Image: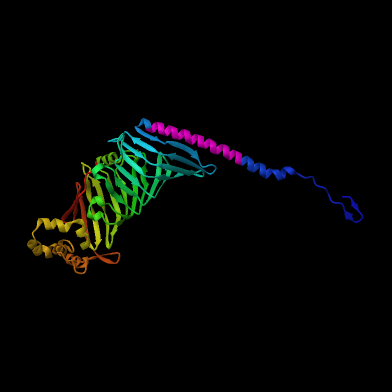
Amino acid sequence: MRSIGDEPLPVRRKRRPWLIALPLVLVVAIGLGWTVFWFQAASVSRSVLAGWQANEAALGRTYKCAEQDVGGFPFRFELRCSQPTAELRSTTPPAALAAKSTVVVAQVWQPTLVIGEATGPLLIGEVGAAPVLSINWSLAQASLRGLPTDPERLSVVLDRPLATSLDGSAAGLIGQANRAEFHARIAGGSARRDPVLDLALTLDQALAPMLGRAAALPLDLDMVGVLRGLPSLSPRSLKDTLRTLQAANGRLEISRARVQQGDIVAIGTGTLGLSPRGALDGELQLTVVNADKLLPLLGVDRLVTQLLPQATRDKLAPGLDKLMPGLGNVLRGAPAPGGGAAGAEALGPSVELEGQRAVKLPLRFSDGAVLLGPFKVGQVAPFY
């Protein structure tokens, strides 16, 4: 190193401008590569979707959109479909469905989780005929984990669902709720062979006036169970699915169902199936708080009133109280003293549910007939 006097001269180092530009070049290269990848993947998605639609059409299931577009660049794939329609000609009778729009989204880094949102109303009817059912909502979302051909978990959430009949003289409200949630998970087998399904259903402030007085008042429902008996999850109509389930002696094993309507609370467990003609069969063991208030809602008082004259009812009232809590007082036209607790004591030791006195009652379904304890309280029409 040369120096002038006692001080060394500075050494000149060569500048390398490419080191400064290298990060920028890498970012541009990655961006270009990602863009090529995304658009190639989007093109493949369109091809796969078109192939799936063709395969479904060959099986009698036609899905169409008035307008269809794939977007979501750069970090997700988004399929938008306006005025989606479905014609299921393989079902009996052939069914047609139509909605306003749908959006389906999958993140690039998590392609096996698909999230969808739909805009209603959903109109349902037979192919070539006017719709007979309308289902609307303020928000409808669904998520599917797994591949479409091999799903693992499905969740559907509806805010303020509203079902209305459009069928001529029977037109009117079928049911509504503040919120409805449905979850299904494959717990055993596979979607293609002998699936065992964990199911959960939650309804908030739901009512269905067409089902009678007991369902005309808002109630909350929280139910979990296991469904066994389906050979596969191949697309079928609801009626075809139920027929297949009945032929395989399928069963819904309810591990816990909680219903609350006002201050009436019931918790039940049991198993439900279908009779050969498609009506409900099975039994639930219920534990009920305020059972005496439940009886008028189910029409037990009117049933016995029609069958027995007043003098006979007065004579039998004490014995009827022993059969079912509070029934004697209901038939006399007076509330049960102390609520359902008085009747419960007549049955023997009462049970406790959520800190309140309750009684246990069997709820049985026999080829559609509904029996609560010794009384037939209703009839459920066959599902097919």
Which residue sits at x=49%, y=34%? 44
Quick check: is 44 in the magenta stretch?
A: yes
Q: Is residue 214 left or right of residue 57?
A: left
Question: What is the x, y in percent for residue 92?
Answer: 27, 35
Question: What is the x, y in percent for residue 300?
Answer: 17, 57
Question: What is the x, y in percent for residue 69?
Answer: 48, 37
Q: Is residue 122 left or right of residue 349?
A: right
Quick check: is 70 in the magenta stretch?
A: no
Q: Is residue 326 left or right of residue 31?
A: left
Which residue sits at x=57%, y=37%? 36
Between 186 and 259, the residue placed more toward the observer is 259
State whether residue 125 appears in this view: yes
Residues shaded magenta? 31-56
Which residue sits at x=21%, y=50%? 365
Colouring used for the render: rainbow
Principal secondary structure, stretch drawn in magenta: helix
**In which image quadrant can residue 348 be found?**
bottom left
Q: Looking at the image, is 233 positioned above or below residue 11?
A: above
